[in-house]
Image (tube, helix red, strand yellow):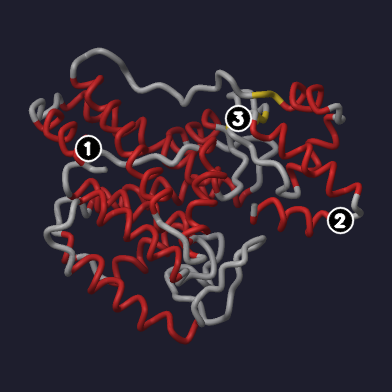
Amino acid sequence: MYETLTQKKAALDGFRPLPPELVSNLDDWFRVELTYSSNAIEGNTLTRQETALVVEKGLTVRGKSLSEHLEAHNHAKALDFVRSMVERPREAFSELDLLRLHGLILQGIDDQNAGRYRSVPVRISGSMVVLPNHVKVPRLMADFIDQVLVHSQGQHPVDVATRAHYELVTIHPFADGNGRTARLLMNLLLMQQGYPPAIIAMRQRERYISSLEKAQLGGSREDFDKIIARAVERSLDLYLRAAKGEDAPQAAPTAGLLRIGELAKITSQTVPTIRYWTQHGLLRIANRTDGGYTLYEKTQINRVEQIVALKKQRWSLAEIKAQLDSS
C-alpha cells in the first residue's frame, strides 16, 4: 500500500530544499485548509473563505458563533505548535506534549477539560462503539505513547501515523476534541518524517467516520488505512506539482456536488426539509461554497430515499439516524 507513497516522497526529496517563498505559500495554504477541513468534520459551519478570514486576518464573521471562531483560531494555533515540534525525534513526544496540544484545541471553549484526560464515561453519538472506561485512560495512554510512538522503529511512517490516529480516537481519552487532536498528531508524525500533512476533506467525512467505526467494531482497518494513504498521496502530489512549478494549491473541487435546492428537487422534498434533516445529522454536507451554500454528494439522494422510507414506518429521527449511521 505504501510503495507509491515512498516513491513520491523520494521524488519530492529530490527537489529539496524547496524555495523559501514556496514553502511559505504551502504552509499558509495548509494552515487554512487543515483548520477548515478538520473543524468542518466536527460540525463547524465556517466556510473555507471564512476560516481564512479568522485565521489569517483575525476577523469575525457575522452570524457565526464565538465557539466556531475559537475552534478556527485554536486549531491554527495548535498546528503552529505541531510545526514547532517537527524537528524533534518521534520518541521524544510525551503525554505532556499531547495534553498541551489538546489544551490549545479547547482553550476558551472548554477550559475545564482542556489538556486533561476525561474523568467520566462517554459515548459517540449515533455509534454502537463502546469506549474504554475512563478509569483505564491513563494506563491506555501511557501504553499508547510507549508502543505507538516510542517503539515503532522500522515501520513505514504513514503506517505509524495512521495507527496513532486510529488508536487515539479509539481510546478517546478526552471529553471533546479527540478527532482534531488525533489528526494533528497524525500530521506531526508525517511531517517529522518529511511527508506533507494529510487532509481529510469534508466530502470524505462519511466514509472516514464509517471506516473508523468499522474497525472499532471489530472489522478490518483496511478501509481507514486506505483513506489516510490516499490523503497523504494527494498532499504529495500537490507538493510535487508546486515543486515543479506546475500548479499552486487550490481549494477542494465542488464539481459534481449538489446544492441543497438541487437535492430537494431531485428527491421531491422541500428545501426546509432537507435543511432540517441536515441539522439533525441525517444528511451529510460534503462541502460549502465560499458564499456558504451547502453542497451534497450524490450518494445523499439514496440517503433521502432511506429517510423517507423509514419515516413511513413511523421511525423517530433518532432511530433513523442510528440506522443510517450503522448501515
- Residue 85: x %, y % from top left: 21, 54
Q: Amino acid at mark 2?
A: Trp
Judging by the rendered image, the residue that carries numbered circle 3 is 288
| Vertical side of 16 occupied by 192: above or below | below
Tell me the element at label 2: loop
Q: Earlier in the sequence, mark 2 or mark 3?
A: 3
Judging by the rendered image, the residue that carries numbered circle 2 is 315
Q: Earlier in the sequence, mark 2 or mark 1?
A: 1
How far is the residue under mark 2 from the one under mark 1? Answer: 46 Å
Q: Residue at x 55, y 43 (%)?
A: 40
Q: Earlier in the sequence, mark 1 or mark 3?
A: 1
| Numbered mark located on residue 5 in the image | 1
Q: Amino acid at mark 1?
A: Leu
Q: Residue at x 87, y 30 (%)?
A: 270
**Contact? badges 1 and 3 (CB < 8 Å):** no
Q: Looking at this view, is 182 or 163 the one in front?
A: 163
Q: Residue at x 45, y 57 (%)?
A: 105
- Residue 121: x %, y % from top left: 58, 79
Q: Is residue 8 left or right of residue 135?
A: left
**Contact? badges 2 and 1 (CB < 8 Å):** no
Residue 248, image quadrant: top left
Q: Looking at this view, is 25 or 305 the one in front?
A: 305
